[in-house]
Image (spheres, rainbow, N blue to C red):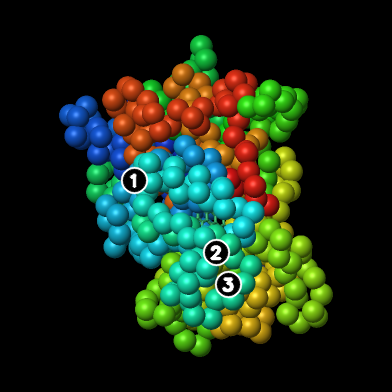
Amino acid sequence: MALPPHVPAPAEPTQPPEKATYVIVGAGVHGLSTAWHLAMELEATGKGSGADIVLLDKSGPGHGATGIACGCVRNFYMTEPLHAILRHSVDVWMHDPINFAFQQVGYISCGEENQIDDYAKIHKSQNAVDYHSDIYVGKDAHKFLKRYWPDFKTGPVGVVLHEKISGYAGTLQMVEGFTRKCQRHGVQCHWGVDVIGYDITSGEVTKVHTNMGDIACDAVIVCTGAWMPKHWRMLGQEMKLDVRYPDGGLAKDQDMWTYWRLLEGDVYMDTPYRDARDLDPPVLHVELMNTPVIDSNTGKEMSDHLYVYWKNGAERLFDKMGIQGGTIPIKLGPEATVDPYGHANREYWAEPEFADYFTSAMGQLMGRFEGCRDRFSKRPNGGVGAFTPDNVPVFDWILPNAYMIADSNHGFKMTGVGKLVAKMLIGGNEPEELKPFHLDRYQTGKTFGDRNSNCPWV
Ligand SMILES: Cc1cc2nc3c(=O)[nH]c(=O)nc-3n(C[C@H](O)[C@H](O)[C@H](O)COP(=O)(O)OP(=O)(O)OC[C@H]3O[C@@H](n4cnc5c(N)ncnc54)[C@H](O)[C@@H]3O)c2cc1C
């Protein structure tokens, strides 16, 4: 079957070198950001250059989740250590917002009264790391929302958080921008090169085996997104583990990796999506845990709670004006068909029930979206991701010279991770911001996951 028109074809393989100091596997957001920042660190410290880095992708840059993400850049997490990571990420986005297609429109999250305490904690923690946000409660929250969207049906909303420096980025444009940065700094980029194994001698990776030959290396950085479980196995790691929680609870024999499928889609509009200022509105995220979603066509209850997010879709490979957004992902389990990936894989396209839910919820929230079911785009959408046991990223050495950036599918927004990892690789000291995300948290009881939400991203 022909690929949907916006699915990129795999690149023709190019021959990688036989050795390199650093091999980075995977050219999604993390591989690209790490390669670019590592090249800059090498240059700045006089320790080398981009030519010391080989960046590989079995298909091409942005051919994984990075190329199909909604592109939301926000910091609404109960997991407080993520707030500092996101502060770095926004700095990276703002380093070159034009080439990364970053729209700093802000982000607004809305909840009901039951979430006021959570919002207050998030607000405090964000501001403590200079991630500027404001909080509004009750009538003030309603007034604040109406300033942007006069047709917002604010009834059930009890609390609002406004992240001023968040926004969204164009996915394909961002991939091009980061790839150009890597190339300008002399990183050896090779697409169509599939890593098929690792040579591990005395516990360290000595060579990366590829379909185009072996590459001897000093260190490998694995950034393979949904393919992480495969690389985890190839690096000799266990697929099951015991997970200890801060309250002393122990969950034995858990899956290290669980696949979830993300549900997203687009709704077309006749006029540009604008707010009362006649500007591109902030990214919007609404979780109403006590408000059911009613199907706008049948009048039947579809869900006893509402969870949606959306933002302007016009910057993406969008053929019409409109918005793009999604809802809570669906848990699949430890196995999933990862190839073909993304929109090329029909198995994981968001189904019509998602369109019913999404458009009904949008109509429930804003007058302008009432009856918009017919405007839901029929193009493929959605995709799978590999999540960790607490659905929070793991950034850590899995072997003494093999580092893993596994973002648990949070991570289009996390361009700052590559910057921090590059500093560690060259400076030797691990930045404090990365430390909470070590693997041993599952043994030591520092596992994350405390939440008051129906969503796995906490
Ligand atoms: C539908 C959808 C919507 C999303 N929306 C958002 C959002 O709005 N905001 C947000 O922050 N996050 C979002 N995410 C999550 C985000 O896209 C991912 O967390 C992030 O892009 C992962 O980046 P990565 O670099 O780890 O992996 P990827 O982007 O998946 O890149 C991994 C790369 O590794 C390559 N690779 C794999 N195996 C090999 C191998 N053996 N040899 C060589 N190369 C290999 C792949 O080809 C791929 O290009 C979304 C995800 C999906 C699926």
Q: Is label 3's Cβ within 8 Å of ligand 1?
A: no
Residue type (three-letter) at the residue carrying disc 3: Thr
Residue located farthest toward the top when viewing the structure as drawn: 202
User: Residue beneath label 1, please?
Assistant: 130
Q: Residue at x 62, y 57 (%)?
A: 113
Residue 149 appears left or right of 113 = left
Q: Residue at x 52, y 24 (%)?
A: 398
Residue 107 appears left or right of 268 = left
Q: Are marks 2 and 1 in contact (CB under 8 Å)?
A: no
Q: Quote the CA–CA distance across marks 2 and 1.
A: 25 Å
Name above or below for residue 254 compared with residue 97: above
Image position, residue 216 (x, y; %): 41, 25
User: Residue beneath label 2, please?
Assistant: 138
Front label number (1 vs 3): 3
Front label number (2 vs 3): 2
Judge the density around disc 3: few (<14), some (14-19), many (≥20) Cα neighbours within 10 Å: many
Q: Which mark is residue 154?
A: 3
Residue type (three-letter) at the residue carrying disc 1: Asp
Q: Is label 2's Cβ within 8 Å of ligand 1?
A: no
Q: Mark 3 or mark 1, which is nearer the start of the sequence?
A: 1
Q: Quote the CA–CA distance across marks 2 and 3.
A: 10 Å
Residue type (three-letter) at the residue carrying disc 2: Gly
